[in-house]
Amino acid sequence: MTTLDVEHLSKVFTVRDQGRRSRLTAVDDVSFSLRSGETVALVGESGSGKSTIARMLARLTRPTSGRILLDGRAPGPKRAYRGQVQMVFQDPFASLNPAHSIGYHLRRPLLLHGRTRRASASDGAVDLLRRVNLTPPEQVARRYPHELSGGQRQRVAIARALAPGPRILLADEPVSMLDVSIRLEILHLIDELKREEDLAVLYVTHDLATARYFATSIMVMYRGQIVESGPSDDVILRPAHPYTQLLAAAAPDPATVRPARDSLVVRGGKPPATGCLFRNRCPHAMPSCSSAVPTVAVGGSSSHSARCLLL
Amino acid sequence: MSDVVLSVQDLTVDYGLHDPVRAVRQVSFDLARGEVLGIAGESGCGKSTLAYAVTRLLRPPARLTGGSITFTRPGEDPVDVLSLEGDALRAFRWRRIAMVFQSAMNSLNPVMTVRKQLADVFATHEPDLGRKAVEARCEELLDLVGIDRARLSAYPHELSGGMRQRVTIAMALALRPDVIVMDEPTTALDVVVQRDILDEIDRLRELFGFAVVFITHDLSLLLEISDRLAVMYAGRFVETGTSRQILDNPQHPYTQGLLRSFPSLRGDREALRGIPGTPPDLARLTGGCPFAPRCPHAFEPCTHEPELLDGVACHLFSSKAVAA
């Protein structure tokens, strides 16, 4: 059983715009936990800070404040940490080196993390390819990225992430660049690996439907803050925060008739910097929304909570 | 049918002269005035090539090698779109058929203001229009797509992705075309903005009555917005029908697979698997049904490619028809 605890994580970027400096809070005081055997989905629109969180968890970006604890302890050096926490990136066309074979991509992490000796590295690579159902693995190992389709490349990226034997897998939009017909296969693969190896998975996505389908719980981000979180079905079927309601109503879903959405969002207004950050678009905004908004339990539930004064 | 505005018959597009790759193979459809025709397909199925062919924007090595495109306005003679050349083509394109491209950032010029780019349309197509009139038309266009007039002086990078796409839609609307071809207009946008743009398109369509060819890989989206739908695979239409028919009663195994490729947002959780395998390489088609290698129902006749009959190109149905 492995847990990754995130406590009060924040990231502030300094933005330079024509000589002026300004601060952009990409992630604002976010706390959550990842546990073995569970998938947590992080959903939100582009620019909401969800990738920044994944990158901080992978230690590709340094947090401005807050802590990341692995099994309750502050993690040690990067390499040891990355043996436990691995990431799959969005674009399988950019995340593999076109000049190296697939086998090379897999042997390298095996060797760097001391998972295998040089002599048996090729066997290790073949074994990884077999685990992500790329067959025949011996042949695939000799190929180069351009010889593979997008879905096959993403399988290679997953195999590479598995190489160090991680306990935690961060998947940052792992299927948004892939064709519709192969997305589910990749998500099922991640799901099966999660069960077989008892991984903890963070699934970053903007697709509510697959988030509900694959994740145990969902966190909804808006402008750097988690505005709602809870068990997947609760968040999607009974969204409490007006922003989650907007997201759920905007998603294409031919199976259900859409409610009238005119009441769900108002346009425009300067985005506020304090209080509820959604209030300029919220149809229920009240004067008190400009003060600090607490996160409260939804309907007496212990796991479903939202950051809204309406509750 | 007299209200057909665009009729495409057996359109075929090849890439390359020697050993050409056939990207669009005998595609036919009729687009009615004011209708939304959705074309669904995955990357490499030829859907963008089809869009460029219909708007006569193909560039070498792509070549139109067969078929016909006829454009008809009520009370006017039909226009053979493929025979248009030079000034006649320039006058036709954009005035009659406009296009909205996938990446708004790439279809707008980064060093020109929005005003300049919108005015460009009028400078080319309505050169007699005075400067004030052009300015007024540009302002009106931004009003139409819900952008503040002050943004006429903005450069594309100063606009958000959604606003850029609105500008390209405004540009397509500039000359009140009869048909707008939209190639993945919302793919790069997130759901809330996508929904806004779709509503906007819907509203404008009611206002001006233009017909839309909407091309995307997102079948769930198409089912919602289009009147009729065509599913494209390996350069051909494999199934056509109304959105309702395709949602309720998909025939072709590929369409069925696509529909099982995305979970429903609010419906029950069912076991979903997508489609095994990968789309075919158009350069290596075998002459059989291109979907057969991924098809759970493949049987002997599939070594010959089926024709599109009664809205579906699949031997499962043609053999039934023979048996009956």
Image (cartoon, coloured by chain):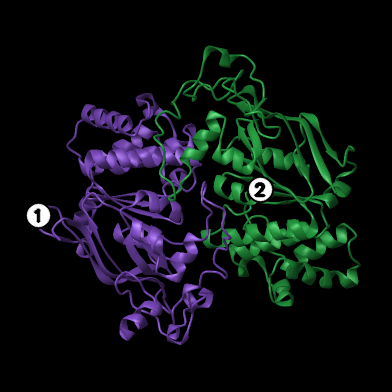
Chain colours: A green, B purple
Q: Quadrant of residue A63?
A: top right
User: Residue most toward the front?
Assistant: A300
Q: Which mark is residue B76?
A: 1
Residue B144 rendering spot, x and y as whole percentages:
30, 33
Considering the numbered disc 1 on the image, is that residue within a helix, a strand or a loop? loop
Residue at image point 23% right, 29% down:
B131
> Does mark 2 fall on the same chain as mark 1?
no
Name the residue rendered at 50%, 72% in the picture.
Answer: B280
Question: Residue beneath label 2, please?
Answer: A215
x%, y% of residue B148?
Answer: 37, 26
**Amino acid type at image mark 1:** Glu
Kind of element beneath mark 2: loop
Badge 2: residue crowd in 10 Å (few <14, some 14–19, many ≥20): many
Locate the C terminus of chain B by quadrant: bottom left
Contact between marks 1 and 2 (CB within 8 A): the answer is no
Q: Name the one closer to the observer, A27 or A12.
A: A27
